[in-house]
Amino acid sequence: MYIVGGRRYGKTYSIKNFLITDFIKHGHKFAWIRSTDTALDKIRQPLQFFGRIKNLKELGVEKYDISKDIIYINGKPAGYLFAVSTFHNVKGADYDCKNGCWDEFMRAKGERPVAGKREKFNDLCESVFRDTGARIFAISNSTNQFDEVLEPFGLTLKEYGCYLFRELDAVIHYVQPSKEHNATFEGSLSFLGMTTQEKKMVVDNKFTTYGDFGKQPKGKYLYTLQVDDAKFLNLFLNVSENVMYVKSGLMEASTIYTLESEYVNSAVKRLSQEGKKILKRYYDNGKIIFFDGYCRTMFQTTVE
């Protein structure tokens, strides 16, 4: 269940209530996941994780603690804290979690990118969750709807509502703001200093889309950049307009380069630092047109 909603929608509060209740009633352990260790540091203290939950007594929580990334409720291990970026640290351990939440799965502005984030999360799930019957929530504010986590669904979130993907066993809930939520937020101190666009993102749960997509200029094929195990970006250059075009996929007879040493082999060469600087220069000067937002995200994650 992917839940995309603005700030103060109650996403985190509601899911924590569910996870805690399910543990107390049925003993089902849970995993609370963030993309990086830096993001995880913000909730590693017990009060940071439990502090905003005002109905703990009603849920049956008499005492709580967090020690060495283990969440204790009433003296028993109830859950675990994990970072996607360091998923390899949990290999071989037995966690046996039934429920989980990937908190802020979309990369926020200024947050360090995690290359191959979706694949690393899937590997983490293999180690942490039971083979069958696990329930996973992924929640985020409306930041970049072309985040690689949503790439398999191939959709653009425009209309509020629930998008069902039966074959992928998933639902994406793009949450519509309520009048009550808006009225509460408009009375807050942070609301006063926001720009119109910021208010649309925070209050109306709207995305901001940067860049021009799909306008392919005529250009000469340069090379293909491998950015993940099975992800490739094809680069074309229109010399007369000095514009580069980027499209995902792997063409036949491709000349493949990479910035990651792990992908180098007889068919894939290492892109030089000068080559990387050229890509950054084109991007920084607004001279790259991307086929879609997912191409843009892959490029940013790789070249930044």
Image: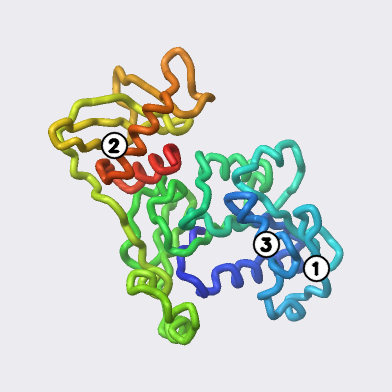
Depth check, front residue: 252 or 303: 303
| Marks 3 and 1, how far apart at CA | 14 Å
Depth check, front residue: 289 or 168: 289
Mark number displayed over residue 246:
2
What's the residue type where badge 3 is placed?
Ile
Quarter occupied by residue 160: bottom left
Residue at left offset 44%, top offset 52%: 166
Is residue 41 depicted above or below 190 in this figure? Answer: above
Label 1 sits on residue = 64
Looking at the image, residue 207 sits to the left or right of residue 14; the answer is left
Residue at left offset 39%, top offset 49%: 153
Q: Nearer the viewer, mark 2 or mark 1?
A: 2
**In which quadrant is the C terminus drawn?**
top left
Q: Which residue reaches farthest right?
A: 75
Residue at left offset 77%, top offset 79%: 57
- 3 or 2: tag closer to the N-terminus: 3
**Element at label 3:** loop
Is residue 67 depicted above or below 179 in this figure? Answer: above
State the image coordinates of residue 21 (x, y, percent, origin top left). 70, 69
Mark number displayed over residue 174:
none
Q: Nearer the viewer, mark 3 or mark 1?
A: 3
Colour mapping used in the image: rainbow
**Element at label 2:** strand
- 3 or 1: tag closer to the N-terminus: 3
- 2 or 1: tag closer to the N-terminus: 1
Is residue 65 depicted above or below 153 in this figure? Answer: below
State the image coordinates of residue 282 (x, y, percent, origin top left). 29, 38
Label 3 sits on residue = 43
